[in-house]
Amino acid sequence: MLIALTVGLAMITGAPSVIARTAAGTTTGSPGVFAINQDLHTVIFAPGAGGPIRPVMSGLMNPPQIVVSRGGSLFIIDGPRLLKITPRGIILTIRSGMAANSTIAVDNDNWLFVHHGVQVFKYSPPDGSSPVAVGGGRVR
C-alpha cells in the first residue's frame, strides 16, 4: 500500500504511517511534522511552511512509534531500542530490550513515559535517563 502525506507543496511517498507534530524551537527549529517511512526505515521531517523534506535518521530496524517533546527532543521506538535525538542531532540509546508492544508518550513538562511490558516508567527531562517505575498494568 502506498501512503502519501502532503505538507505545503511537498509530498512524502512510501509508507509514512507514524507522524509526530512539532513546534518552533524543537529538533528541527521550525514547525512541521516528523514521519516514519516504514519502507525505507527512516524518519523524515516535513516543514509546515513547505520547503524540502529532509531525513532525520536512517538505518532503523522497525520504528513503529515516535514522539516529540516540547524541549525539542525526538524519541523513537525502533524494534527493541528506545532512541533519543537531541535538538542538536545527537542520537542516544536510552533503553534496549524493549517489549514488542511498548508505547511512549511525553507530557507537557517533557517527562518521557514508557509503557514496557506491564510496567510504566518515566524518564527525566534533562537527559532522558534515570527511569523511575510509576505504575503497572496492561494497556487494552
Image: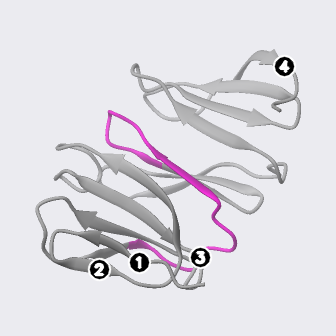
Q: Residue at x 59, y 33 (%)?
A: 129
Which mark is on residue 19? none
The kind of residue on which mark 2 rests is Met
Crowding around mark 2 (Cα neighbors within 10 Å: few <14, some 14 to 19, many 20+) is: some
Give the answer, above or below, for where 21 lies relative to 110. below
Crowding around mark 4 (Cα neighbors within 10 Å: few <14, some 14 to 19, many 20+) is: few
Distance, label 4 to label 1, CA atoms, is: 37 Å
Helix, strand, or loop for circle 2? strand
- Of tags 3 and 2, which is closer to the observer? 2
Crowding around mark 1 (Cα neighbors within 10 Å: few <14, some 14 to 19, many 20+) is: few
Residue at image mark 3: 38
For the record, the magenta segment spans 56-74
Which mark is on residue 4? 1
Q: Is the Cβ of the residue at disc 1 closer than 8 Å to that at disc 2?
A: yes
**Residue 4 pos. (x, y %):** 41, 77
The kind of residue on which mark 4 rests is Gly
- Of tags 4 and 1, which is closer to the observer? 1
- Name the one closer to the observer, 86 or 44: 44
Q: Is the Cβ of the residue at disc 3 closer than 8 Å to that at disc 2?
A: no
Residue at image mark 2: 11
**Residue 53 pos. (x, y %):** 26, 76
**Residue 117 pos. (x, y %):** 87, 37
Sequence-wise, the earlier of marks 1 and 3 is 1
